[in-house]
Image (cartoon, helix red, strand yellow):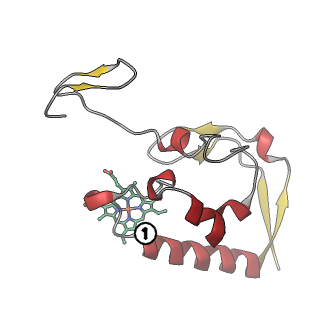
Amino acid sequence: MNDTRFLDDGDVIPKGTNIGICIYKLQRNPKIYPEPNEYKPERFSKEESEKRNFYDFFAFSGGARGCPGTQIAYTQLKIVIATVLQNFRIESKGTAADLDTYWGPVLKPKNAFIRLHCR
Ligand code: HEM
């Protein structure tokens, strides 16, 4: 930051501070996503998405330095998921509650419990 900022809650961010945004926490904010750890794909319906601020879903960042590959990434994801579902039967040995994760540039499963069977 180029200037010291005084926030409404009394916190001060000194000049020169590097700021990182925790996307994981932001996207599990229960005020925006009630029951954030529940699988509710309907959260992302057109109607529900339109109720939220653009920056409430931040996986691809935003603004002038936001990810220019967003649409490619969405297309790739759909192709990969469709290809996997077409070619494999998926067996799960546990539930999402059993899943432990590594923190890093991306979130990775520590104890994967999915098995793929060729169709
Ligand atoms: C699931 C897939 C992807 C995710 C979650 C993702 C996420 C992000 C995020 C969060 C940023 C901003 C990083 C920052 O603030 O410093 C970013 C930047 C960028 N992404 Fe992606 N990205 C994905 C796929 C892609 C793809 C497929 C491409 C290219 C084909 C791409 C190209 C870029 C580039 C060039 C930047 C730098 C933009 C800049 O600094 O002006 N990304 N991405």
Residue at coordinates 59% horizontally, 40% vertically from top-left? 29
- Counting from the top left corner in percent of width and height, residue 42 is at 72, 64
Q: Is residue 54 above or below residue 4?
A: below
Q: Quadrant of residue 44?
A: bottom right
Element under disc 1: helix
Q: Is residue 49 above or below residue 56?
A: below
Q: Quadrant of residue 84?
A: bottom right
- Counting from the top left corner in percent of width and height, residue 93 is at 86, 50
- Does 14 sit left or right of 27 as displayed? left
Instruction: Specify the amino acid type for callout 1.
Output: Thr
The residue carrying mark 1 is 70
Exactly how many numbered labels are in the figure? 1
Whether ligand 1 has any atom under 8 Å from the Cβ at mark 1 is answered as yes
The residue furthest front is 8
Q: Is residue 87 above or below residue 45?
A: below
Check the picture and name the quadrant holding the N terminus.
top left
Task: Report the front residue among 24 and 100.
Answer: 24
Tell which quarter ligand 1 is in.
bottom left
